[in-house]
Amino acid sequence: MKKVIIVLFINLFFSSISYTQTPNPQLNKQLDEASRAFLAKNYETSFKLVEPLASQGEPIAQYLISLHYLNGFYVEKDLNQAFNWVNRSAEVGYPPALTQKANMLIVGQGVKKDLPEAFRTLLKASDAGDSDATSLACILFSQMTEPGEGAYHLCLLSKTYPFPLPSRMLQVEEIIAKVKPQLNTEQIRSAEAKVKAWQIRRWVYPAK
C-alpha cells in the first residue's frame, strides 16, 4: 500500500446551517448559540451549552463537544474523548461527524489508524452532500490504490461539488490530471455519467 499523505484540516470547525436544523426550535436556538460561541472563541460558553445536550444523546452537540476535546478548548485535550463523542454522533449519520471521524481514523487520533474504515466513513458523509468528505475521499482513495476509474469518479465528483479550500481542490485537480490520461474512453464516460446521475442523500435528524 502506498504511503498516504493528505493535507488534513481536522482541527478546524466547519458548520452548515442545513445540518443544524432539528425539529425542535428551542434546541436549534441552543445549538446556534453554542456554535456562535465556539466560532467567537468563547469556548467556556460553548462547552457549557453543549455538554448537557451531548449527554442526552443530541448528535450535533456530540459533534461540537468532540471538537472541544480534540483541540483542548476549555477542557483538557483528550483524543480518546474526542473520538468517543464524534463516533456517537457519526453513528446516527451526522455528516460533519462522519468526516471528523474519518480524519481521526486516517491519522490515528484517539483510535487505531484504519484507512479502509476511514474511506468507508468518508463515502457515507459524501453521499450526504459533505464536500469536505468528497474531496478527502478522492485524495485518500487515489493514494490507497492504483489510479483508476474509481479515483477519477470521486475526484470529478469533488470538482463538481467543490470544497471551499483552494489547497485541497488543487490536490483534487492534480489527481484528475494524473489519472484521466490513464483511462480509456469508456471508463471516462462511465465516471462522468455517475457524477451526472449522483444525488445527495440529505441527512435526516433522527426521530426521538
Image: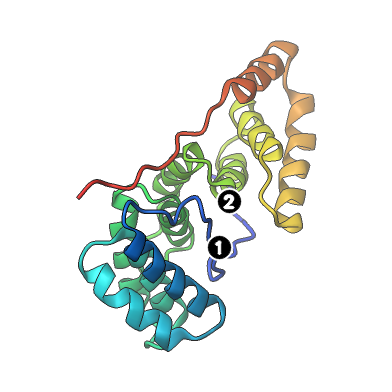
Q: Residue furthest top?
A: 186
The residue lying at 23 percent from left, 62 percent from top is: 57
| Crowd band around label 2 with a 10 angstrom C-alpha radius: few (<14), some (14–19), many (20+) | many
Which badge, 2 or 1, comes first in the chain's sequence?
1
Figure quadrant of residue 30: bottom left
Please say if the residues under marks 2 and 1 sit with CB atoms less than 8 Å apart. yes
Percent position of residue 207, x then y: 23, 46
- Give residue 39's quadrant in the image: bottom right
At label 1, which amino acid type do we have? Phe
Give the secondary structure at mark 1. loop
Labelled disc at residue 132: 2
Q: Which residue is mark 1?
A: 14
> Closer to the camera, 159 or 54?
54
In the rendered image, the vertical position of residue 106 relative to residue 41, given as above or below? above
At x 46% / y 84%, what residue is drawn? 43
Q: Would you say 186 lies left or right of 8 here?
A: right
Mark 1 crowd level (few <14, some 14–19, many ≥20, 10 Å Cα): few
The residue under the point 59% across, 21% down is: 194
Q: Amino acid at mark 2?
A: Asp
Q: Which secondary structure lies at badge 2?
A: helix
Q: Is residue 169 above or below residue 126?
A: below
Q: Is residue 16 left or right of residue 89?
A: right
- Rendering colour mode: rainbow
Q: Is residue 171 above or below residue 56?
A: above
Residue at the image point whose x is 22% and y is 70% from the top: 55
